[in-house]
Amino acid sequence: MVSEEEVGSPTSQPHIVAAAERAKYVLVTEPARDGGCCVTGRKGAARMKIVARGKPAHSGVSHRDGESAVLEMARQIVDLEAMTDYETGMTVNVGLLSGGTGVNVVPEHCTAELDIRMIRPEDGAAAVARVQAIRPYNPAVELTVSGGMNRPPYRKSNAIASLYEHARGLASEIGFELGETFTGGGSDGNFTASIAPTLDGLGVDGAGAHTLEEHLYVSSLVPRMMLLRRLFQTLN
């Protein structure tokens, strides 16, 4: 039971990894995907923060004396978002932005937080290095970069494929079709997939993830419970 998965499991990760190293299999009860599919692969993720510090000034009296941290960050955001490459599965999203102290003040501070997703580990390393190497357009504005890779890509191995086929057969016996999918969302399965065969998305089916309309299908509760029980009974 993990209470901090949505923020990257910053303190639970080493405990999850240690448990996986003692396990023969890992079963992750993240919600099902795409009409009840389980997950056999996920993108990796990086979380990074950029802080810009400029020079404040009164926007009407002494505007030319100021150095805008917000303007600098706006220029950087255009470059950062341009790193997105749908062909390779790389996405860069500046999801949080804050800055300034007043509408009549040249902003001294601005902070941007990035979420980076990738399929290949080498793409993640390259993206993190590129963000770490950014330089200000305005040399009077200081940039500070922190963060890095948060979750490695979860790649489907032969052992994971075999585990999925076993689960699919059990689901068929119970009376439903268990599909599989690859997703861009991360989970704690990203930490375990390279350590022990990991099957993810074994939780309830539903829709509207991460929205105010998020819901589960009551009809999926018993079949998914039965599948987990049969997995516990048959994996040894």
Image (cartoon, rainbow, N blue to C red):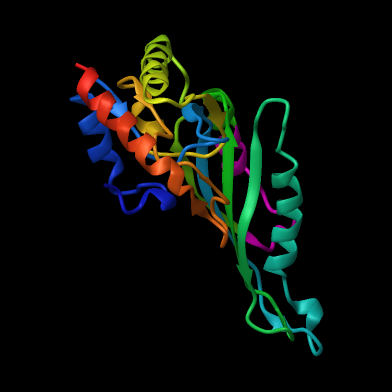
Measuring 65% from the left and 33% from the top, which residue is drawn there?
90
Left or right of 194? Residue 180 is right
Q: Position of residue 234 (x, y in %)?
A: 23, 18
Q: Can residue 204 be seen in this view?
A: no
Image quarter for residue 140?
Answer: bottom right
Q: Where is residue 223 in the image (x, y as percent from the top left)?
A: 38, 35
Q: Can residue 3 be seen in this view?
A: yes
Image quarter for residue 187?
Answer: top left
Quadrant in which the C terminus appears: top left
Query: Is residue 131 placed above or below 172 in the rendered structure?
Result: below
Left or right of 22? Residue 165 is right
Q: What span is in magenta?
A: 127-142
Query: Which of the two residues, 204 or 124, is positioned nearer the viewer here?
Result: 204
Query: Which of the two residues, 219 or 180, is positioned nearer the viewer here?
Result: 219
Query: Is residue 156 placed above or below 133 in the rendered structure?
Result: above
Measuring 55% from the left and 27% from the top, which residue is drawn there?
182
Image quarter for residue 194?
Answer: top left
Left or right of 166? Residue 118 is right
Q: Does the magenta stretch include residue 161?
A: no
Residue farthest bottom in this picture: 61
